[in-house]
Image: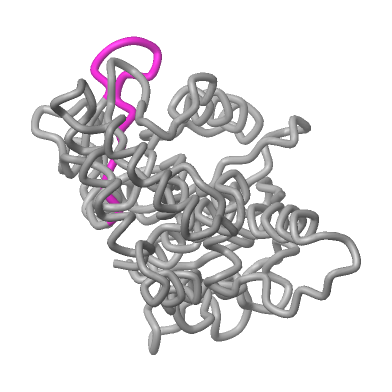
Amino acid sequence: MPESPAAQSAYDVLGVSPTSTEDELRRAYRLRLRETHPDTGGSAIQFQAVQAAWSRIGTAADRAIYDAGSGNRFDRSGGPGPAGGAGGDSAGSPGAGMGGRASGASRGTPSTLKARSFGHPGGDERVHYLTLIREWVGRGVELTDPYDPALVRSAPREIRRWLAKAIAEEETARIVSTMGIGFTVWNNVLVGRTGENVDHVVLGPAGLFAIASHDWGSEVRLSKSELVGDDIADDEDPLRSLGQSARMLSKSLGVTFTALVVVVPDDDLAVGCAQVERGRLAGAVVVRRSVLPQLLRNGVSGVVPGGRGGEERASVDRIFELRSRLQDSIRFV
């Protein structure tokens, strides 16, 4: 699995700059070993991470390979690998960033059987990343490839997180696009005049879902009614933020969402799916990326034993009517 742009780099783990000398790197490694060693009150997980970081950049040869990048590509549409969008009106389609309707063969013809896709998944986040990476490199410096793996890896983590978020949204849109013509996804949906957005609104036979795609580069877990993790800031409330935006969007569009869903990379969640049990967000779920298709096809109760799905299979006429209303009303970031 490609390394997340948001994950801690080997330099982050050791607490040094990518421009550090060999002596500075060695001193930092020894200090971090003492700080994290379990026998002195440290964490076994952090201790192992320090050792793994040193194995990647501890010698001049290994460091040169690491600094050159792992070969992961972060293209302008579609995330790692060859450029490509989500299908339908994908991120790579002309006019997709303008929130235009799908047209022609991109609408999911019988030959492709792809879901309809509107808007630009990850587009707003890529704009933020490009703006910040150019500011960080410096005014007047020619930046030939803002997605160069070595450049991405050397950038501050707060910049890399924007790219990780964009790729996460693009991957969700790609997954939905493969689920067939019974599904429609609107990406980067504007919430009223707040400037906020819902990453994806997905309509299918199991209902209408408000989805946020995230990648913090490390493990997360559900604690009571919110997502927590080492790299989720204290003032960052992913589920509450999605809930607030979804409520505002629901009111403006005159619809009711079947469920709120946060999607994260498979390696970052210990279970396939976890559901909020109590409170205003009861029924909201966080899922591994690979579990998302099952949830969208079968509803929350289809992936969480005893889950509070409450969803009903919508009729074809109902889906058609709701899709037409949403298509006429949704606006994009």
Location of residue 64 with respect to 183 vertically, above or below: below
Magenta-highlighted residues? 276-289
Is-magenta flag for residue 64?
Answer: no
The quadrant holding residue 136 is bottom right
Asked if residue 166 lies left or right of residue 144, the reply is left
Residue 328 x/y as whole percent: 68, 51
Image quadrant in which the N terminus is located: bottom left
Residue 266 x/y as whole percent: 25, 52
Asked if residue 69 lies left or right of residue 197, the reply is left
Point 52% across, 51% down: residue:
165
Report the coloring of the rendering: one colour
The quadrant holding residue 54 is bottom left
Location of residue 253 with respect to 102 vertically, above or below: above
Residue, far top = 279
Residue 298 x/y as whole percent: 21, 48
The quadrant holding residue 105 is bottom right
Magenta: main secondary structure: loop
Residue 68 appearing in the image: yes
Q: Nearer the viewer, residue 329 or 231?
A: 231
Residue 321 appearing in the image: no
Location of residue 135 with respect to 84 vertically, above or below: above
Point 39% across, 48% down: residue:
217
Residue, far bottom = 111
